[in-house]
Amino acid sequence: MVIMMATVNNPESNSLADWLNTLSHKRIRFLRLLSQIFFFVVLNGAFLGLARMPFPAPVHIPPGSPYAIVWGGFSAIQFILSSGQFPFFALGIFFISGAISGRIFCGWACPVGFWQDTLDTVGSWVRIPKWKVSRRTDEGFKEIPATIAIVAFIFSSWIGISRLKGDIVADNFITRMAWDALDPAGTLFVGWFYAIFWNVVPGDSGFFSNLGSDLNIFILNSIILVIVSILSLKVPRLYCRYLCPTGALLGYCSKSSLIAVKRNPLNCVDGCRECEKACPMDVPITEFGLEGISDTACIACGQCIDKCPEAMSFGIRI
Amino acid sequence: MKLQERLFFYTMILLGITFLLLGSALEELNILETVDKARNTNLGAWRDFLTTWVHTMNPPSTP
């Protein structure tokens, strides 16, 4: 009680700066949480009355998300390609945002990234031990998102060319946005949302009509979602690291991004590697220095800066 | 920033601007807008659109 009184009566300790200081090493984490909540609400802002825009954003928003006000960039690319047009505008968005801000949208704005971070936090709360993925395995699995992106790109192009030639092509999720029809994030944000809140299940509505029994596909998707979610409790950002084609595309464009996380080797303690242990994307941070981290997996989340503000910082590369 | 990185950065910016202009000129976003018009801000309309869209391809087995 005495301590509480002392705290309340001391104007110094009630200042915003002091409050931020009390957050100490979790300061960036807290700001990022605020940013993720803000973007989650705004990007799904149709329930607030915000108008839907035909704009491809450089984040992953499953296309059927009922309240989404923008298009997920990769979904837009697939949709435009499968309509028989090259997605210049959508790719341009990726090039510009990747070159300027790197994968900062993945870390600070993406709703699916927010879902992954939430699972990671829940896993820590219930003290689920984390798995350390070996560097070799990680390098292999990191190729999956780019492979998904390339396959989806080729498939959508083939569908688009078939449409231009006048061939009859079914018009459904598979032929329009093939990856999104199988995407576990889509199952969570769309399939389960429809089932729980609107009592519409794919078996009734005809989702995935080209793949045989809709309900079976929905069940299969749900199983994949549960597996990915459980694994995400043990491996932080599992979806972003090993499944997300949006992140792969943005990562490729962000190799020399203007905004980057930098490491000052002079302030580093040999063999400490606390920054690498804190990194949810398992980036080999100590391989980089003042020139900035140019690993395509870096989402500029700032966990490393929280852990070691002496050596790590946000910076501009030029 | 090394020369190679600098080149990559400027290539990305130039490509990005060119692609944005090309996409605008070709009215590429109209494709997305046709879908968006159906859903707009009206949630019911979007739900109806989505279910109608798939119903026309494959009528539901249950009413």
Image (cartoon, coloured by chain):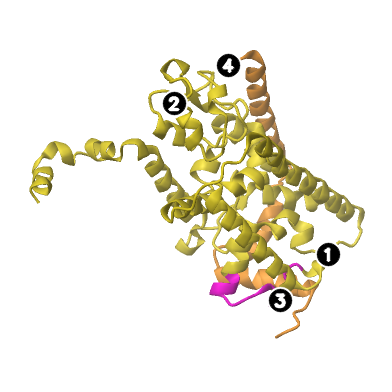
Chain colours: A yellow, B orange
Could you tell which of marks 2 and 3 lies nearer the N-terminus? 3
Q: Which residue is mark 2?
A: A312
Could you tell which of marks 1 and 2 lies nearer the N-terminus? 1
Coordinates of residue A2 in the picture (x, y in percent): 7, 48
Q: Which residue is mark 4?
A: B1
Distance of mark 4 from mark 3, alpha carbons? 54 Å
Residue at the spot 61% in from the left edge and 14% down from the top edge: B2
Residue at the spot 72% in from the left edge and 54% down from the top edge: A179
Q: Which residue is mark 3?
A: A203
- Could you say whether the residue bearing mark 2 is in a helix, strand or loop? strand
The chain under label 3 reads A
Distance of mark 1 from mark 2, alpha carbons? 52 Å
Q: Is residue A198 magenta?
A: yes
Label pair 4/3, CB-CB below 8 angstroms: no
Distance of mark 1 from mark 4, alpha carbons? 49 Å
Coordinates of residue A249 in the picture (x, y in percent): 67, 39
Distance of mark 2 from mark 3, alpha carbons? 51 Å
| Highlighted magenta segment, given as a residue range | A194-208
Q: Check residue A170 in the rendering and tell me which mark sits there, or answer none.
A: 1
